[in-house]
Amino acid sequence: VRLRAFAAYSLRVADPAGFIREIAGTNGHFQTEDIDGQLKRAIVTEFSDALGEMKIPALDLAAQYKELGEAIRGKINQDFLEWGLEVTKFFVENISLPPEVEAAMDKRASMGALGNVQTYAQFQAADAMRDAAQNEGGGAGLGAGLGAGFAVGGQMANAFSANQPGGSGGGEAAAGTAACPSCGKANASGAKFCAECGGKMEVSKVPCVKCGAQLREGAKFCSECGSTQDKAKCSGCEVELAPGAKFCPECGTKTPDAE
């Protein structure tokens, strides 16, 4: 990403003898403008180097101006001291991104603040209305802008739904699929085993021991009446009883369901 930066710095001659030897030389009418370009090139080089070493995200640059300035000053002085100069202060005033990058970052921040796809679609529609109102096309432009805004929002909503396991409205991509009862992974309709966990796609049904409602095999509690699915046994002979049995078929002992 291209960056544009503005900074200010204070400079002094730290080693007069070295400065005269390296910079002024035999020039009797030396001026600051004579080395201005050389100093700027050194600053730009060290600025880029320091920014790369610190690895500061673009969104966090504004909060790191002071730290960045100190890092740059230290690097610049390594070069400047060879010329008898020293940078005493270096202030980063502003670092700006290209307009298109800033616009993309603003849009991303807006999406994060809005929080969901439906709200983003409304946000896009509002943008389209604003842009259409600024055009000379009148009502036709307004209709086209609204259509574009809702189309973009709708496409994002469909893509979001298609990526959700078991989500409704996922479009054609979600049609003809079935969720694995064990892991929830979408599988092709008619598959006998899950491609993700290898579990059976069709789970046998068993009746609830209390109310007879159909439950998945292995369920510990009934989703209808909430009763535990431990097999009921006769208190007299320990024979397993059928769901809802009032008397034991082996010994005739009365069961709790008969009370």
Image: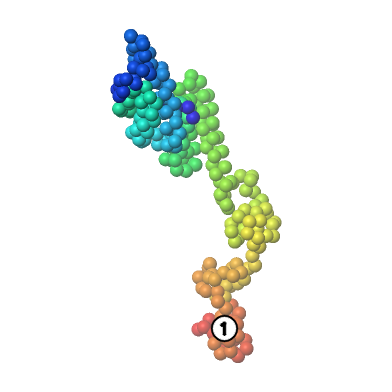
- The number of numbered discs placed on residues in the rendered structure image is 1
Using the image as rendered, state which of residue 154 and residue 198 is in the foreground.
Answer: 198
Residue 257 visible, this angle: yes
Helix, strand or loop status at disc 1: loop
- Left or right of 193, for residue 129: left
x and y percent of residue 121 in the render? 49, 37
x and y percent of residue 136 in the render? 48, 19
- Left or right of 186, for residue 55: left
Who's the residue at 30% across and 24% down the image? 14
x and y percent of residue 220 in the render? 54, 71
Using the image as rendered, state which of residue 55 and residue 157 is in the foreground.
Answer: 55
250 up-or-down from 70: above or below? below
- Left or right of 245, for residue 70: left
The image's colouring method is: rainbow
Residue 92 visible, this angle: no
List the residue tagged with mark 1. 233
Who's the residue at 43% across and 21% down the image? 41
Who's the residue at 62% across and 48% down the image? 174
Please name the amino acid that badge 1 sits on. Answer: Lys
83 up-or-down from 160: above or below? above
Asked where in the image residue 44 lies, by quadrant, the reply is: top left
193 up-or-down from 118: above or below? below
**Around disc 1, counting alpha carbons within 10 Å, would you say few (fewer than 14), some (14 to 19), or many (20 or more)?**
some
x and y percent of residue 173 in the render? 63, 46
- Left or right of 115, for residue 10: left
Asked where in the image residue 42 lies, by quadrant, the reply is: top left
Using the image as rendered, state which of residue 144 and residue 124 is in the foreground.
Answer: 124
1 up-or-down from 192: above or below? above
Asked where in the image residue 236 lies, by quadrant, the reply is: bottom right
